[in-house]
């Protein structure tokens, strides 16, 4: 074995509860490591993670981006036609979905999102002490995202549990996956039902996918599965993006003062929170050939775990990486991945965060932690269960 073998288990609950505490051991061990606990390779330095994400021919997605190798194991649901595919299929589905998830339609939605964020923030400020995951981070996406997709009116509460299953599903069959699966039936049934053409409202992104099918750009079955991608990836991620944004300012109060003094820093603050927070911790790829790297060889057909969140705090790349610093240019972070699979919904995420942040800035003089933030353990997401804060009125 030419790579350092580590006993660290990245899906151990102790690791998942405080991943950043364990990342330096992974990075410092070498550019490529062997993770004995899960029997796969790992990369945690920016210099290896970003190029691996870019090299889709070598580090493929079609055998799954979780620990399970779809060449050997049956996936828990039919594979995603975006996430768990390679070109040429990937490029056709991605091209179609890029047109649906257009910046133009987001610009159209943004005034209503800003109004909704203002309303929510005013309620929160009036209460003073809030739990920001419930009051903001879940409330906002659950209000705006179903409308964007054109979902039916009932059952939106299934979206987060479904996301939890899917994101746990990229890890091993541990307690977290088993427990989320045990409660999965209702959420899965609701999502599967809601992706159907007959369930979608005209004018939303869901129906727009079926309209692409009508133009012959994909089959009806493919459209169904592509709508499922919106429902899987679009909620639990942005919920935690917003939770983490609030949490970041609660941890670094001087950054809030800085932002209120110069509102033009808002976009940088969002990017920096995406770098610092590590909402999406990891993704796997599978090697399509023997790869010579860092003085060793990763054999063909190996699973490689890419630690996005560790790359985003790699001191070889970033100065003072554990500091949330909104003056920093965090551009180039891999929080949304990199290359052909880079997050399709990244502008949804950024604009949701921007709507919330722009509503907070004029109304809130200070964001004060009133207790410790609580983690919601998940195999892929750095999810927050609770972020208790006081919003001091401006
Ligand atoms: C799908 C797409 C993307 C899908 C981890 C996973 C994902 C961000 C982090 C994700 C999940 C599912 N996105 O196409 O179903």
Image (cartoon, rainbow, N blue to C red):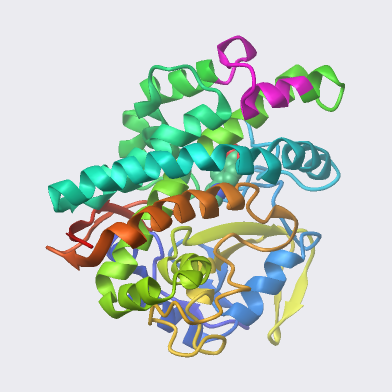
Horizontal side of 139 relative to 76 (left or right) equals left
Identify whether 303 is placed above or below 93: below
Q: Position of residue 310 (x, y in %)?
A: 48, 74
Please name the residue shown 71% across and 35% down the image: 100
Front one among 149 and 363: 363
Identify whether 157 is placed above or below 5: above
Quarter of the render that holds ligand 1: top right
Horizontal side of 357 relative to 146 (left or right) equals left
Front one among 351 and 94: 351
196 inside magenta stretch: yes
Identify whether 279 is placed above or below 311: above
Q: Quadrant of the C terminus?
A: bottom left
Q: In which quarter of the image is the N terminus?
A: bottom right
Identify whether 390 is placed above or below 46: above
Please name the residue shown 62% across and 38% down the image: 108
Q: Where is residue 177 in the image (x, y as percent from the top left)?
A: 38, 42
Determine if residue 163 is in view.
yes
Horizontal side of 373 relative to 380 (left or right) equals left
Q: Where is residue 208 in the image (x, y as percent from the top left)?
A: 70, 25
Q: Which portion, as a residue range, is magenta? A: 195-211
Q: In which quarter of the image is residue 9?
A: bottom left
Please name the residue shown 78% across and 63% down the image: 58
Please name the residue shown 68% across and 85% down the image: 294
Name, please, the residue furthest toward the top.
198
Front one among 282 and 205: 205
22 inside magenta stretch: no
């Amino acid at each position: 074995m030419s790579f350092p073998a580590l006993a660290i288990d990245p899906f151990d609950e102790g690791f998942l509860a405080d991943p950043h505490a364990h990342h330096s051991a992974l990075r410092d061990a070498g550019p490529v490591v062997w993770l004995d606990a899960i029997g796969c390779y790992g990369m945690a330095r920016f210099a290896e993670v970003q190029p691996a994400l870019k090299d889709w021919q070598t580090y493929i997605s079609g055998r799954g981006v979780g620990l399970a190798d779809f060449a050997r194991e049956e996936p828990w649901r039919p594979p995603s036609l975006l996430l768990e595919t390679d070109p040429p299929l990937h490029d056709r589905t991605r091209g179609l979905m890029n047109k649906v998830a257009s910046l133009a339609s987001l610009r159209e939605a943004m005034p209503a999102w800003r109004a909704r964020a203002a309303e929510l923030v005013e309620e929160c400020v009036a209460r003073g002490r809030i739990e920001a995951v419930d009051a903001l981070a879940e409330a906002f996406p659950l209000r705006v995202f179903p409308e964007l997709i054109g979902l039916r009116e009932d059952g939106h509460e299934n979206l987060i549990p479904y996301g939890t299953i899917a994101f746990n599903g990229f890890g091993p069959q541990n307690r977290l996956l088993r427990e989320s699966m045990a409660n999965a039936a209702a959420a899965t049934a609701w999502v599967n039902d809601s992706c159907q053409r007959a369930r979608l409202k005209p004018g939303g992104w869901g129906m727009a996918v079926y309209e692409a099918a009508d133009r012959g750009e994909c089959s009806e079955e493919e459209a169904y599965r592509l709508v499922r991608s919106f429902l899987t990836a679009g909620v639990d991620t942005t919920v935690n993006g917003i939770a983490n944004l609030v949490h970041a300012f609660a941890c670094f109060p001087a950054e809030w003062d800085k932002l209120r003094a110069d509102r033009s820093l808002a976009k940088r603050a969002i990017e920096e929170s995406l770098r610092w927070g590590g909402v999406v911790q990891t993704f796997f790829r599978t090697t399509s050939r023997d790869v010579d790297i860092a003085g060793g060889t990763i054999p063909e057909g190996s699973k490689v775990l890419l630690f996005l969140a560790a790359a985003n705090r790699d001191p070889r790349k970033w100065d003072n990486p554990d500091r949330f610093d909104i003056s920093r240019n965090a551009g180039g972070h891999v929080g949304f991945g990199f290359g052909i699979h880079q997050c399709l919904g990244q502008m949804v995420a950024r604009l949701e965060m921007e709507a919330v942040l722009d509503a907070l800035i004029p109304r809130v003089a200070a964001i004060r932690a009133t207790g410790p933030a609580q983690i919601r353990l998940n195999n892929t997401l750095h999810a927050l269960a609770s972020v208790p804060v006081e919003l001091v009125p401006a």
